């Protein structure tokens, strides 16, 4: 059952990701990305990261992607014609990506311990423990990241404001 | 039961698809979404390795990546709206001037 | 997982979906009746006694109406949007406990899944609900629908923040994200008659959450995404027949979810006086739970019948400049009290 779920969500994630790359209307790409994120959230649950799974759906799928969909709707730009499509990207990029994938996969197979099996329920990342770590061990990064997000907030307001 | 390496390879596949989208797409919003896909792929390997070492640090790193992605999305989409106001297009090939 | 447990769980899911859909149908009847009384009318009276069969008649009417698909819609997304709304609205009920743990054959009768992150789960599912509305607005290819969709996505993101923040106080007090633990932390009473409900220490949080939740479910006075006087019907202008009914169902199911959430988090869930024989003792918590949900639904409808609609800029200003800071103040106060008590 567990294996079936892994392959279901893994295939869904890859399928949606392929769809994202191939679609030429941004809203379809956005929907595919939401699908990828939902599948990944399910995979996180299997890896015992339930807090991260919930945050993935709330922050990524529920806030960031809504922002994307909102902007696509607001600009309401139709399908983009592929003007002077970069031939370099097609001819050189795709083979290089395949090389990258092959090298990553070979390294993973060489380094990753083959006896390590992921069993559902083996490891349970409880939310309280994550919170404790976040506010003790990682307090400084947390504060820095909150300043970062404040800067981003101000930046976004300045950028999106209409010049009067 | 699934070997850990499956998760890592899945993450690699998603990352490469993100790179492909970044290179092949011409629409700036979709390019931006490909970047998000790459971030998501990296997050998956963080969570998988967090499981492997039975440590929560990986999950906390994912949390930080999400915050940075949110900040990036806010600023990036602000820039996209500003560019669209001036150029009336989302095609990156049309954005060939730094100043107009 | 044995086959019997699987079968029992499946049966439970079916029963709960059935109950929720019936409750949704009767929530519509209840609303029409209450609003009518608030306006000195009778409401539905023709079909059945007190119009009790009206939901059935409505369902038959909606199902048999002609299903019109406008010519220039984006088909895939147009068909996907209503399904998405209903699915996200119904999924939330998977984590809601309706009563105390009652095991039959190793299966808890009154809850589908007891999640450790129950609150976060419901928040995340309800944050997905915005897609149904936004995509419906966009794919209809109509200016009214698009404006409704845009308004709703901006409104729901803004108010989701305030709703999430106003729950932090409750979470701080109970120290858990599990809905069952949160309810159990509210058991008992001071001096025998003041129940330990979170609404008393969290009055501010309660009002913030209720207001934000009303805005998130697009109900009056925050129903700008479907404001009739300016947007025809907002995001579902171009939908007819069953697809329209699905948006309708989703809206009322969301109302029910919010009422259940408020009951669980602030009103002590199923806790109430329990007495009598064994069977009555198992049924009474369910009764208390339903009564509290019903009271909240009445409050919802009462607000709808009383308040006029906000203007859109007022709505945004209210959310960001008033509700959000208020929820932050609530978090600050609660955490100070919790820290003081921990010393």
Image (cartoon, coloured by chain):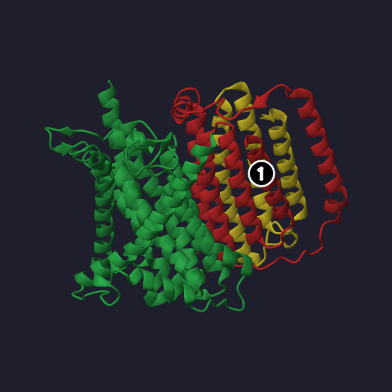
Which residue does the numbered mark 1 point to in the structure image?
A: A8
The answer to whether residue A70 is visible is yes
Quarter of the view holding residue A132: top left
Q: Position of residue A32 (x, y in %)?
A: 64, 54
The answer to whether residue A150 is visible is no
User: Which residue is located at x 74 percent, y 46 percent?
Assistant: B17
User: Which residue is located at x 29 percent, y 29 percent?
Assistant: C338
Q: Residues within 10 Å of mark 1 (few under 14, many from 20)?
A: few
For this rendering, which residue is in front, B51 or C189?
A: C189
**Tag 1's secondary structure?**
helix
| Left or right of C2 on screen, residue C329 | left
Q: Is residue B24 above or below residue B86?
A: above
Rendered green, the chain in question is C
User: Which residue is located at x 32 percent, y 52 percent?
Assistant: C259
For this rendering, which residue is in front, B60 or C291?
A: C291
Q: How many marks?
A: 1
Quadrant (top left, top right, bottom left, bottom right) of the C terminus of chain C: top left
Chain B visual colour: yellow
| Left or right of C157 on screen, residue B28 | right
Question: What chain does mark 1 sit on?
Answer: A
Q: Position of residue A108 (x, y in %)?
A: 76, 29
Q: Position of residue A102 (x, y in %)?
A: 82, 36
Rendered red, the chain in question is A
User: Which residue is located at x 74 percent, y 57 percent?
Assistant: A22
């Amino acid at each position: 059952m567990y294996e079936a779920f892994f392959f279901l969500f893994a295939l869904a994630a890859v399928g949606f990701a392929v769809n994202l790359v191939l679609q030429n209307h941004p809203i379809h790409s956005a929907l595919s990305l939401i699908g990828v994120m939902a599948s990944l959230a399910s995979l996180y649950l299997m890896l015992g990261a339930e807090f991260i799974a919930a945050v993935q759906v709330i922050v990524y799928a529920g806030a960031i992607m809504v922002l994307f969909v909102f902007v696509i709707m607001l600009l309401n730009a139709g399908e983009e014609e592929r003007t002077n499509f970069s031939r370099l990207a097609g001819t050189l990029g795709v083979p290089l990506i395949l090389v990258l994938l092959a090298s990553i996969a070979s390294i993973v197979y060489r380094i990753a311990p083959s006896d390590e099996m992921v069993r559902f329920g083996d490891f349970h990342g409880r939310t309280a423990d994550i919170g404790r770590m976040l506010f003790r061990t990682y307090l400084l990064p947390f504060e820095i990241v909150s300043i970062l997000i404040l800067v981003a907030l101000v930046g976004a307001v300045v950028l999106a404001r209409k010049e009067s | 039961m699934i070997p850990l390496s499956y998760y890592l390879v899945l993450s690699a596949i998603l990352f490469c698809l993100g790179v492909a989208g970044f290179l092949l797409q011409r629409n700036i919003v979709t390019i931006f979404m490909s970047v998000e896909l790459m971030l998501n792929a990296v997050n998956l390997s963080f969570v998988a390795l967090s499981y492997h070492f039975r440590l929560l640090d990986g999950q906390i790193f994912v949390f930080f990546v999400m915050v940075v992605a949110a900040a990036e999305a806010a600023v990036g989409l602000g820039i996209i709206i500003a560019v669209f106001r001036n150029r009336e297009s989302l095609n990156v090939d049309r954005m060939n001037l730094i100043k107009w | 997982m044995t086959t019997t447990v699987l079968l029992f769980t499946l049966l439970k899911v079916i029963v709960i979906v059935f109950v929720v859909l019936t409750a949704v149908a009767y929530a519509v009847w209840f609303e029409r009746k209450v609003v009518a009384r608030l306006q000195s009318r009778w409401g539905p009276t023709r079909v059945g006694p007190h119009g009790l069969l009206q939901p059935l008649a409505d369902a038959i009417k909606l199902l048999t109406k002609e299903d019109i698909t406008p010519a220039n819609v984006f088909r895939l997304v147009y068909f996907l949007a209503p399904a998405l709304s209903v699915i996200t609205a119904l999924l939330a009920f998977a984590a809601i406990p309706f009563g105390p743990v009652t095991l039959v054959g190793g299966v808890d009768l009154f809850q589908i899944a007891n999640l450790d992150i129950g609150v976060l789960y419901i928040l995340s599912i309800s944050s997905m609900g915005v897609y149904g509305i936004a995509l419906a607005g966009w794919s209809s290819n109509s200016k009214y629908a698009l404006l409704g969709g845009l308004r709703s996505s901006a409104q729901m993101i803004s108010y989701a923040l305030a709703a999430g923040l106003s729950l932090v106080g409750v979470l701080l007090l109970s120290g858990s994200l599990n809905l069952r633990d949160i309810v159990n932390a509210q058991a008992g009473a001071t001096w025998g008659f003041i129940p330990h409900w979170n609404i008393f220490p969290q009055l501010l949080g309660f009002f913030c959450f209720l207001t934000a939740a009303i805005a998130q479910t697009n109900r009056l006075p925050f129903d700008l995404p479907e404001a009739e006087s300016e947007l025809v019907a907002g995001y579902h202008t171009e939908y007819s027949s069953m697809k329209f009914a699905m948006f309708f169902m989703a809206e009322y199911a969301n109302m029910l979810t919010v009422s259940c959430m408020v009951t669980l988090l602030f009103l002590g869930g199923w806790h109430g006086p329990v007495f009598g024989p064994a069977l009555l003792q198992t049924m009474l918590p369910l009764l208390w739970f339903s009564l509290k949900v019903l009271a909240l639904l009445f409050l919802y409808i009462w607000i709808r019948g009383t308040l006029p609609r906000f203007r859109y800029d007022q709505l945004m200003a209210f959310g960001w400049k008033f509700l959000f800071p208020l929820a932050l103040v609530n978090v600050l106060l609660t955490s100070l009290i919790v820290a003081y008590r921990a010393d």
